Amino acid sequence: QKEVEQDPGPLSVPEGAIVSLNCTYSNSAFQYFMWYRQYSRKGPELLMYTYSSGNKEDGRFTAQVDKSSKYISLFIRDSQPSDSATYLCAMSASGGGADGLTFGKGTHLIIQP
Amino acid sequence: NAGVTQTPKFQVLKTGQSMTLQCAQDMNHNSMYWYRQDPGMGLRLIYYSASEGTTDKGEVPNGYNVSRLNKREFSLRLESAAPSQTSVYFCAGGDRGINQYFGPGTRLLVL
C-alpha cells in the first residue's frame, strides 16, 4: 500500500460548483500537509499548506486535515475554468527539514464552462 | 529572476546511452531535489541535496547519479539509460521542505 492515496480522476464538474479533493495516508509521522496545483506540461506549484490538524482558508480554497482519520481535503468554492488542473497532495514528517515530499498521484480536475 | 530552469526540455535516447539533465536555481535555496513523474505513479523523489556538497538518495535512486556542483546547480546523470527511465523529470529548490519551487520539467523518452 502506497503511503499516500489519491483518486486520479478525472473529476469533471460545472463552473460554479464546489469541488472536494481528498487524500488518505498511512504514515502517522506526517505533520505537514500540502496541496500543489499542476497545469498541463508545467511544474507543480504550491497552493496551500497546513501544519497538523485543522482548517486553513485562502480565498476560494479551504484545506482541511483530520489526523485522527489520516484524511486531508481541499475544497474549491465557485470553481472556475481556470481551476482546471491536476491537484497533488503532498506530505512531510519534518517540514523544516531538507528531505523530499511524499506525493499522491494527483487528481485531474476539469471545470466545464 | 528565472526561478528554477531545466535543460533540455525534451530528449530521446537509445537504450544504453548516457545523458545529464541540468538544473539551476537563482532563488538562493540551500536544498535541491530531483523527482520523476510517471502516469499512475505520481511524483517520486530520486535524489536530494540539503546543501552544497551533500547528496542523499530518495525513493527511487537506482540507475541515477547526481552532482551538486555549487549552490545554484544540481545535475542528474543517467549512465546507461533504460526504457523504464522514460518519464518526466522535475528539479525543485526549497529551504523549508514545504514550499518547493519546481522547474518546467524534462521529458525523456528512452527507446
Image: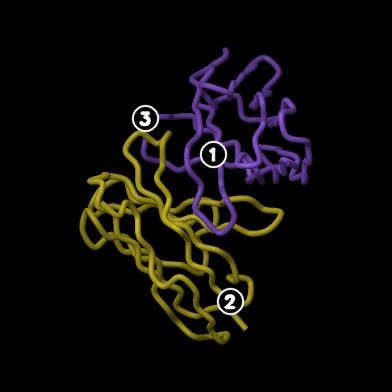
Is B104 placed left or right of A97 in the picture? right
Cα separation, mark 2 vs mark 1, equals: 25 Å
| Residue mark closest to the camera, 3 vs 1 | 1
Disc 1: which residue: A36
* Residue found at the very far front of the displayed protein: A113
Q: Residue at x 32, y 45 (%)?
A: B31
Q: Nearer the viewer, residue B92 or A17?
A: A17
Structural distance between the alpha carbons of marks 3 and 1: 18 Å
Residue B110 position within the rendered picture, expressed as x and y whole percent measured from the top left: 59, 79
Q: Which chain is yellow?
A: B
Which color is chain A depicted in?
purple
Q: Which residue is mark 2?
A: B109
Query: Disc 2 to disc 3, how far (Cα)?
Result: 35 Å
10 Å neighbourhood of mark 1: few (<14), some, or many (≥20)?
many
On the image, which quarter does residue B101 sit in?
Answer: top left
Same chain for the residues at labels 2 and 1, yes or no? no
Amino acid type, mark 1:
Tyr
Check the picture and name the quadrant holding the C terminus of chain A. top right
